[in-house]
Image (spheres, grey):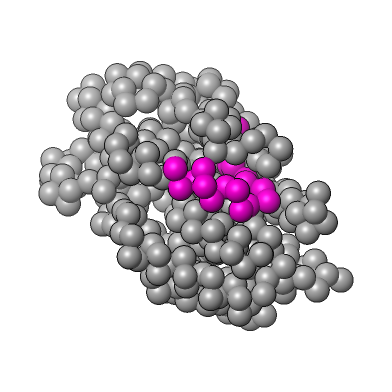
Amino acid sequence: MNSKHIVLVANTTWNIFNFRLNLIQKFLSEGFEVSVVAPIDEYIEYKERYPKVKHYNLHYLKRTGINPIFDILFCLELIRRYRLLKPDIVIHFTNKPNIYGGIASGLTFSKSIAVVTGLGYAFIHSGFVNYFTKLLYRFSANFHRKIIFENQEDKLLFENLRIVNSSSSIAVKGCGVDTSFYKPIETVISNKTIFTFVGRLLNDKGIREFVAAAKEIKANFQQVEFWIIGELDTENPATIEKENLVRWIDEGIIQYHGFQRDVRPLMAASDCIVLPSYREGNPRTITEAMSMGKAVITTNIGGCRENVEDGVNGYLVKIKDNESLSQALRKFLNLTPLEKKKMGELGRLKAIKEFDSQLIAQEYLGVVNNVLNNE
């Protein structure tokens, strides 16, 4: 059995709870000692399932924005932590851990992997933050043995920007989905068609396009509902205003279900999951929907188009295009019940074949072993 010490670093414990438990399970089963370094929140409950995992809090990590004082303190905090833990390898997730964790790893001579889970606000919007983030990534990439991307297009973008080279980068299809947990659930047959948006209520997730298309469709079709599942992310500059959410609810455009710890019942009651996002790594919302046998409508961007085959298990639409989204919604509404079911079935088969959490965990294990063996 392996006796190596592996450390996972993320910007929230929520990230570990939702996306990395398959890795923890795999590493423990292979005999690794596993530690997690992340700001503690209510999702620390994952420790009940994995009591052998040691968890260390982060005090100075600010998820968004550039604050030189906090960012320097965060980097120093990681340096101190790595010197104490003496990891054989560190895996960093999300932008700030990737950047400052890479620097900390270099200064403590720790082998490091960065996982670019999605480029987010800093890459979607031009300006100083965009420029500075690219500059920091280019510098910190020198300290990582491997950089993992969740889709091929992000990998190629970083290579074209000369942040990484092809020999140090690899693409893995997201974080994986537990296809035995997210599975089709029988529900009461309804005469309504329900389109559901699942995710943080951010402009960059296409929430405005979803609402605009909902308004247009509801004016022309009866027995159609539009649901939103998710919460406001007040730390993200792309979050929608609360007043807009209230107005959409009051006008009857959408039904708001708030944040759900378990989205399966509402997904099961939905006919189609809609994510008109501007940029994604490999959205878990989509793979969860596919695994549950639901058709998906999403934008024709990297990460999303790797999951959805247009006209097969869903539809791809143009980015920031209300009309393109409305047309796809209309196409779905005009399908027969059997055609809708077939779309969902094909999506589930694709999820099992390409995105199952155990397949993804095995790929990560292979990368880790290669880095440990200096390959």
User: Where does residue 321 sit, x and y in percent of width and height?
Assistant: 31, 22
Q: In the image, is 154 to the left or to the right of 352?
A: left
Screen quadrant of the N terminus: bottom right
Residue numbers of the magenta segment: 135-153
Residue 162 in which image quadrant: top right
Q: Nearer the viewer, residue 334 or 139?
A: 139
Residue 190 in which image quadrant: top left
| Location of residue 327 with respect to 237 vertically, above or below | above
Residue at x 61% of width, y 53% of height? 143
Taking the magenta stretch, the answer to whether it contains residue 142 is yes
Residue at x 55% of width, y 75% of height? 81
Taking the magenta stretch, the answer to whether it contains residue 35 is no
Q: Which of 171 and 176 is in front in this view?
A: 171
The single residue placed furthest to the front in the displayed view is 107
Residue 326 in which image quadrant: top left
| Location of residue 139 with respect to 27 vertically, above or below | above
Q: Which of 51 and 32 is in front in this view?
A: 32
Q: Which of 246 and 364 is in front in this view?
A: 364
Residue at x 28% of width, y 31% of height? 209
Residue at x 82% of width, y 56% of height? 373
Task: Look at the image and tell me whether residue 368 can be seen.
Answer: yes
